[in-house]
Amino acid sequence: MYLADRGPTPDTTSADAPQGRAGRAAQPGRATRAISGTVFALGTVSLITDISSEMVTAVLPLYVVAGLGLSPLGFGLLDGVYNGVSGLVRLFGGHLADRGRRHKAVAVIGYGLSALCKPLLLVAHTLPMIGAVLALDRTGKGIRTAPRDALISLATSPETRGRAFGVHRAMDTGGALLGPLLAFLVLGMAVDGYDAVFTVSFCVAALGVLVLLLFVPGGRSPATPADPRTAGTPTGPAGPASGSPPVTVRSAVALLRRPEIRRLAVCAGLLGLTTVSDAFVYLMLQHRLGIADRWFPLLPLGTAAAFLLLALPLGMLADRVGRRRVFLAGHLALFLAYGLLLAPLHGEALPFVVLALHGTFYAATDGVLPAAAAGAVPAELRASGLALIGTGQALARLCCSIAFGAAWTAIGDRAALGFAMAGLAVCAGWAAYALRGPETL
C-alpha cells in the first residue's frame, strides 16, 4: 500500500499520439514500466467495496422475488433502477471531477454515499422503498466510477492501460468473488439472514471508504501532459492548470464530435441493449436446473472467478492485438453463454461453462472499454469522456433489464432470451463493421 504515496503519474502522452507498434517503438521501455501504486491502491478500495456490494447483489434477486413475491417484471424494473441510475449520474460525477480536478474527492463522495445506503435496506420492505434505496446507492456508484477510472488512466502510460485496468478489475472482482461467499456464510449462520447480510455489508463498505481516504493520493489530478521528471510530485492547490481550457458541460458533450469517441459510444450502447442482467442469467440457471434457494448466492462466484482469472491476461492481450478486438470477442463469449442456456443440454458441467463464459465476457469488456476510450479523450476531460461512454452503455442496459423482465413475464424466459441472443448477433455484427480499420486505440 505504501506505493500509493508516490501519487499518480501524469499521462505524458497526448491523446492523439500513436498507440500501435510505431508508438510503442518510439517509447522504448514504457511498456514494461511497473503498474502505478495508485492503481493498486484503487484496486484495494474496489476489492473491499465490491465485497460489500456483491453481498447485497447476491441475495437481492432471491430476496425480492422469493421473499417479497415480486414478478420478473417487477424485478426487471428494480434491476433497471439499480444499474441505470448510476449511468445517469456518471456524467455529473465525471464533470465535477474534471471541473475541479479533484478526482479523489469526488470518488470519496461516491463511495461514502453507497456505504450509507446499506443500513437503509434494513427498513425497506416494499418495491418503492427498495427502489429508492438502490437508486441512492447507485447514485454513489455513478459519482465515483468516472473519477476512479480517470485516476487509473492518468496514472498509467498509454501502452499499458489495458494491463492497468486489468489489474484493477481483477482486484475488484476479487471482492465480487468474496462477497457472495460471505453472504452465503452469513445467511447460513444468522437467524435474520437478510438483515445480517445488509449489516455486515455496511461495515465492509465503511472500511473501503477508510482505505480510500488513507492510501489513495489526493491533491489536484494532472490536467495536461507534464514533464516526466516531475511525475509523482504534488501538484499544488486545486484549480485550473495554467494554460488549460475551462471544463464545461459543452466541452464534455462536444467530445462526441470526435469520430473515434462517437463510434465507441454508439457501439457500447447498442451492445448494452442486448446484455441481459446478471441476475436474470442466474435466475434462468436456477429455473432450468432446479438449484436450491440456499445455493443461489454462490452462482455469481462462477462469473467472478472467470473474471478474476482472465481480467489481467485479456487486458494485456488487448494492449497487444487491439482493444476493440478483445471487446468484440467478449461479446462472442456472451453469445455462447446465451446459446448454452437455450440449448437442450444437460449435465453437471453446464452451469460452470455458462458462468465461465459469462465471466469471460466481463473480463474482455469491463476494463478494456475504458482503456480504449482513454486513448481518444484529452487528459483535462478524461473523467467526462469516460462517463459519456459509460452512461450510454448503462442506460442501454437499463432498457434491456426492463424489456427482458417484461418479455419474461409475457412470453417466458426462453423466448425472451432468444430475442436477446438474436439482437446481440445483429448489434455485434454492426459494431465489428463500425470499428473496422487500423487499430488506433
Image (tube, helix red, strand yellow):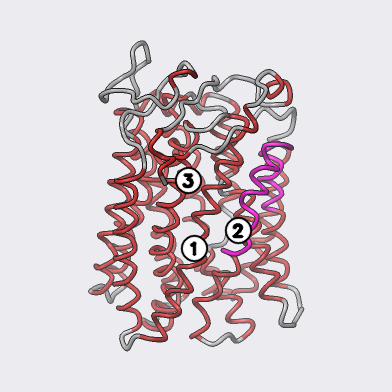
Point out residue 142 in the picture as x, y percentages from the top left corner: 38, 48
Q: Which residue sits at x=66%, y=45%?
A: 327
132 or 292, which is in the foreground? 292
Residue type of the residue flagged with mark 2: Phe
Q: Which residue sits at x=50%, y=25%?
A: 11
Quarter of the image where the C terminus is located: top right
Q: From which residue to which does the magenta span run?
A: 304-331
Which of the 4 image quadrants contains residue 240? top left
Whether residues under marks 1 and 2 lie with C-beta atoms below 8 angstroms apart, the answer is yes
Estimate the spatial distance between the alpha carbons at disc 3 and disc 1, rounded to whole Å: 17 Å
Instruction: Look at the numbered disc 2 and give the secondary structure of its residue.
Output: helix
Estimate the spatial distance between the alpha carbons at disc 1 and disc 2, rounded to whole Å: 9 Å
Crowding around mark 2 (Cα neighbors within 10 Å: few <14, some 14 to 19, many 20+) is many
Residue bearing the label numbered 2: 307
Estimate the spatial distance between the alpha carbons at disc 3 and disc 2, rounded to whole Å: 17 Å
Q: Which residue sits at x=63%, y=81%?
A: 288
Crowding around mark 1 (Cα neighbors within 10 Å: few <14, some 14 to 19, many 20+) is many
* Disc assigned to residue 40: 3
433 lies above or below 412: above
Residue bearing the label numbered 1: 176
* Disc assigned to residue 89: none
Point out residue 311 in the picture as x, y percentages from the top left corner: 61, 52
> Nearer the N terminus, badge 3 or badge 2?
3
Residue type of the residue flagged with mark 1: Ala
Q: Which residue sits at x=61%, y=19%?
A: 17
294 lies above or below 270: below
72 or 377, which is in the foreground? 377
354 lies above or below 215: below
